[in-house]
Amino acid sequence: MLLQYIANGIAIGMAYAIVALGYSIVFGILRLLNFSHAAVYAFSANMILVFMGWHFGIWGAVAVSIVATGLLAVCVNQFALKPLRKKNSDKVANLITTVGASYIIQNLMVMYLGSERKTFPFFYDFGVSIDIGFYTITSAQISMFVIAGLLLVFLTLIIRKTKVGLAMRGIEQNPLAANLMGINVEWIIAIAFFMGGASAAVGGALIGGYYQLAYPSMGVMVGNKAFASAVLGGLGVLHGAAIGGLIVGVLECLIIGYLGASYRDGIAFVLLIITLIIKPAGLFGKKNITKV
Amino acid sequence: MPLLDVNNISISFGGLAAVSGFSFHVEEGEIVSIIGPNGAGKTTVFNMLTGVYKPDAGSIKFDGVECNGLAPQEIVKLGIARTFQNIRLYKDMRVIENVIVGMHINQKYGFFDMLLRTKKFRTCEYESAKRAQQILEMVGLSQHTHDYAKNLPYGEQRKLEIARAIATSAKLLILDEPAAGMNTGESESLMHFIRTLKDKGFTILLIEHDMNVVMNISDRIYVLNYGKKIAEGLPEEIVSDPQVITAYLGVTKEGKDAAGD
């Protein structure tokens, strides 16, 4: 059974990982915990259902929702955070604003879409499963792993190998110098938010499909788990977020298997607390994040 | 027409007039220095030139284009790039990456080139790396290409800042106290280096406290004190200017004796 739980855990963990990326990308560039990310994630799954209602077809709906969710994340930045940065506000003000934005998004969804749980299509399940001895890997788990894995590789390539990624790292290390070397800082920040939002949307589609459910407050639990994953791996470090997500996913499935499903949601937060006590910078984080 | 033509710029912070009515110009191919005691407003002038601050009044014309009010990244596009008094490198990047960041505005490929890794994307990244290597050779940092910026010796970090500024394809390099914290040997070699930059066709605007450097390489000098221009001219005129001596050394009975350093 152990291997079965681990296989389940890796699949769901990959989805946590790509939601966790959004926290990490934004934290990397702005040193800001973006708590609106959970609501942005919920928005993606709910919008997929809306777009399906408009006869986009499931894949079309997913594609449009990825773009729409990316744009929503950009809007949070443009309308809520950018004005604060312009006024040189306190970091805490930014942080609280992201919490506020998350409530606004979530409650707008409740207003317009209703708060009830809606069934979400299990669209990437091709009904095939592979039996290996005592355990089974479904095609859905494989697709989840492959889709999330490709996205991780793609985002890592952007950050490591392109001028946009280099500009992001430049801004992270010295925003003023980056600006004075010709980098349009606000534009790059907007791209970072878009990347975070769009990857949350992929996560929303995968997790929504996995549990076959979507509802406005679905972001709360997954968002917090993803946040714990990002902290576990080291905020601002992309591969850290990925591995953090995998660890949280696997442990969660082991707990479901051996202790029962009622303990499943606790594990992410136990890990979060242990990380903060033992290694606050996370597994892959750099030691001194803030230098005065 | 001068390459950089600054007319009557002023800025105040609260009630303090940091710079008032300062005018100067830089011809193409010149090395011009701005000197003055601490707090005279020199770095503020540089910050206005590069768009960090917006002057309250006055005009800044570079190559005939008005830059007062443009954003920093737009000014870089026009061809002005700078270094900083307190080094602002990307410490956790490699030396060559620091230079490539400077090329950001000249790397022209779109999102889809990036997504599909088109030929355009690959050539562009390849060309950037090649050019960065050339620039590093030119400033004499090629043996450090793959070191982390934070591990370079101080003098080399300053050179790297200059390399990064050159990478933006700037015509005018604005150097803010490049010799700060350098020993005599280092500042000698810096002086030599700035001269070679001039020979390569760069125009240079300099803030410097090291009078040995200023007097040796400047074509012309402007002196600021309390945000106002108190003198301008050739180095030999500046050293013997009574107002300059007063500004630097305070009022003395026989101020002229102290002229020189």
Image (spheres, coloured by chain):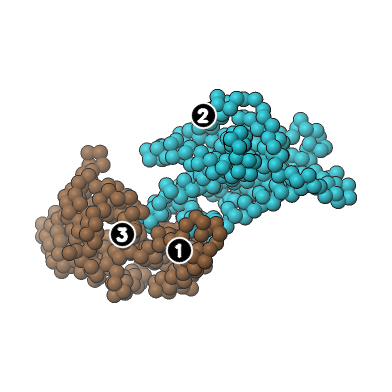
Chain colours: A cyan, B brown
Residue type (three-letter) at the residue carrying disc 3: Leu
| Residue A158 position (above or below residue B152) | above
Residue occupying the point 67% across, 42% down: A206
Q: On residue A104, which mark appears?
A: 2
Q: Residue A243, image x and y in percent?
A: 67, 49
Query: Residue A52: horizontal and vertical position, in percent?
Result: 62, 36
Relative to the observer, which residue lies in front, A127 or B121? A127
Q: Which residue is mark 3?
A: B78
Q: Which mark is drawn over residue A57?
A: none
Q: CA distance from mark 3 to mark 1?
A: 18 Å
State how far apart marks 3 and 2 are (Cα). Answer: 42 Å
| Label 1 – label 2 distance at C-alpha | 41 Å
Quadrant where the N terminus of chain A is found in the figure: top right
Q: Is residue A226 left or right of residue B41?
A: right
Q: Answer with left or right where residue A165 lies relative to residue A122.
A: left
Q: Which of pointers 1 and 2 indicates the residue nearer the eye?
A: 2
- Can residue A71 be seen by looking at this rendering? yes
- Read off the chain for label 3: B
- Number of disc labels: 3
Residue drawn at x 37%, y 38% is A87
Q: Amino acid at mark 2?
A: Ile
Say which chain tag 1 marks: B
Q: With A205 as the anchor, is A96 left or right in this view?
A: left
Q: Identify the residue under disc 1.
A: B100
Q: Position of residue A252 (x, y in %)?
A: 74, 39
